[in-house]
Amino acid sequence: MSNSVKFSIDGETNADQVAGRAKAAVGSLDKQLEGIGNKFKTSFKDIFLSFLGPMALLGTAMGFIGKMIADNAKKREDANQAAIDQTNKLMSAEDQYWANKRNNEKKGKETVEEAKTQREQTTLEFLQNDPRGQDIYFREQRKYQRGPTRGEGLSIPYYRLKENKRIQDEIQALLAEDIKNKPITMAGKDSSFSGPQGFSNVIGVGANPVLENMTRQTDIQQQILELLKTRPATSGITDVDFTKNPIDIRNVS
């Protein structure tokens, strides 16, 4: 069947038939396209679910494994601490001995690491903040610029100096002299309280000249006040107790 539109001499035409066939073809194409789209959507959902499902299972499994590892680590830590503290009567003396031995070794390593870290920190802060440290830094900088590995415009990094034992020892010697010549109160050390001069450091023991002088001054002031109150009248002027009777300046001639 031809899809061409034809016209006859007598006016007949197949245009309606051709148009109907075209509409049918377009409708079939729309259905096919819709089917392809639905299949694509379904396939994408299947792909997404097929990917999400294993990932969700993997995440759950990893979370469960992580919790088991954390729980086991805590159990080991608690058991080790119980052996160190000797709070578990079921643990043998050998287990307790080994736990304490390992704990002492661990603390020894931590102590050494702390001392090393503080030595480097002291060296770094001295180089950056103390004028003598600045002199040391610029001296080493000049050596660095004259060395075989010098770089144009580069400066020697502070971290290289703070880790240098020669620099550390030099700064330690300077600080040792400061301790002798400029001692300071160390944090955490007890210091004697120095009260006002004349006060005893022991409460209730011995006379206190400061308090005695203060009491004496109060007594003298009270005596002066009583004397002013009882002073006899002179020159026709009547004395008034100024502490009780206000003065009316309009009556003063």
Image (tube, rainbow, N blue to C red):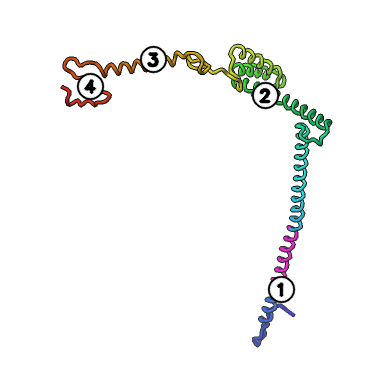
Please provide percent x and percent y for residue 95.
82, 32
Nearer to us in this view, 91 or 74: 91
- Single out the mark in the foreground, 2 or 1: 2
Disc marking residue 216: 3
Residue on which the image places disc 1 = 28
Q: Residues within 10 Å of mark 4 (few under 14, many from 20)?
A: some
**Dot 3 amino acid type:** Arg
Task: Give how far apart the Cα atoms at labels 1 and 4 are.
Answer: 127 Å
Foreground residue among 112 and 24: 112
| Residue 152 in sight from this viewpoint | no
- Determine the residue positioned at 36% across, 16% down: 219
Query: Percent from the top left, x then y, of residue 8?
Result: 67, 85
Percent coordinates x, y for residue 62 in the rendering = 76, 48
37 part of magenta stretch: yes
- Name the kind of residue labelled 2 in the image: Gln
- The residue mark sitting in front, 1 or 4, is 4
Quarter of the image containing the N terminus?
A: bottom right
Q: Which residues are magenta?
A: 30-48
Q: Which residue is mark 2?
A: 118
Q: Amino acid at mark 4?
A: Val
Is 34 in the magenta? yes
Q: Are marks 1 and 4 in contact (CB under 8 Å)?
A: no
Query: Secondary structure beneath disc 4?
Result: loop
Q: Which of the two labelled residues, at mark 1 and mark 4, occupies the earlier sequence position? A: 1
Earlier-in-chain disc, 4 versus 3: 3
Residue pointed to by mark 4: 240
Q: Quadrant of residue 161?
A: top right
Residue 246 falls in image quadrant = top left
Q: Nearer the viewer, mark 3 or mark 2?
A: 3
Front of the two marks 3 and 1: 3
